[in-house]
Image (cartoon, rainbow, N blue to C red):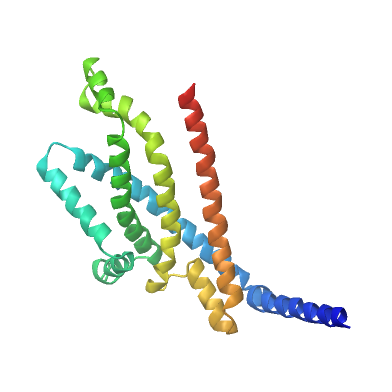
Amino acid sequence: MNLFTDLIVAESYWSDLWAKIHQNLIHENRYMLLLNGLSVTLRVTFFAIIIGTVFGIVLALMKMSKSKVLSAISNLYITVIRGTPMVTQLLIIYFVVFASVNVSKIFVAIIAFGLNSSAYVAEIIRAGIQAVDRGQTEAGRSLGLSSRQTLFLIVMPQAVKNIFPAYVNEFIVLIKETAIVGYIALEDLTKAGDIIRSRTYEAFIPLLSVAFIYLIITSVLAKLCDIVERRLNRHDMR
């Protein structure tokens, strides 16, 4: 009798769960909201990391330069960006910088996250370069190479191994940080889950679905990072 009752309870549970999944994800094609939101999240992240990488390299070189002015400018920028919340920076860029300009919200988000990421990428690159033994620089200079040639031909190839794991981690962090773009009414993955929740008055399924998608993306990136890092280590051992 107890087994029969348990089977009925289990069947009722799975039936209710399927009904909630259908209501939140399948009914009215609500899963498309998540897919469209995921597209926005990936676009913002992809272009932001490109901007962050380009500006990050420039900031790192400025910070390590012999010019006190360039080094001070880079230090000030990195300090301000890393010392203020990302959401505050996003709101400033949207409501202040672009307040009188008609631009798309995706563009604003890309600029905001790109500028934010550049400060962290700059420190990653600087630390990676400085981790290379100073004797490598001296060897390059003794061969008649200029400072720039030594940096890009000798130091940077060796620094890549130091930079890569932290750089991928920055990419993963950036993906998760884009969840705040809903503050400027941009419908990313997190906002899509919130929209579904507001329509169905059910929080568990849509928010769990959003969390699961983020987990899959970040896990895949972390796995790819491990594979590439192992190959780099094997290459160094040869």
| x, y percent for residue 200 | 60, 83
Q: Name the image quarter holding the N terminus.
A: bottom right
- Pick the front one: 126 or 48: 126
In the rendered image, the vertical position of residue 173 relative to residue 148, given as above or below: below
Q: How many discs mark residues in the rendered view?
A: 0
Q: In the displayed image of the protein, which residue is found farthest to the left?
A: 68
In the rendered image, the vertical position of residue 155 relative to residue 186, given as above or below: above
| x, y percent for residue 169 | 43, 50
Q: Is residue 182 left or right of residue 30?
A: left
Residue drawn at x 41%, y 62% as measured from the top left = 177
In the rendered image, the vertical position of residue 19 relative to residue 172, given as above or below: below
Figure quadrant of residue 236: top left
Residue drawn at x 41%, y 56% as measured from the top left = 174
| x, y percent for residue 140 | 26, 20
Residue drawn at x 24%, y 66% as measured from the top left = 97
| x, y percent for residue 24 | 63, 77
Figure quadrant of residue 207: bottom right
Q: Is residue 99 left or right of residue 235?
A: left
Residue drawn at x 45%, y 53% as measured from the top left = 172
Q: In the displayed image of the protein, which residue is found farthest to the top?
A: 143
- Pick the front one: 195 or 17: 17
Q: Is residue 122 left or right of residue 201?
A: left
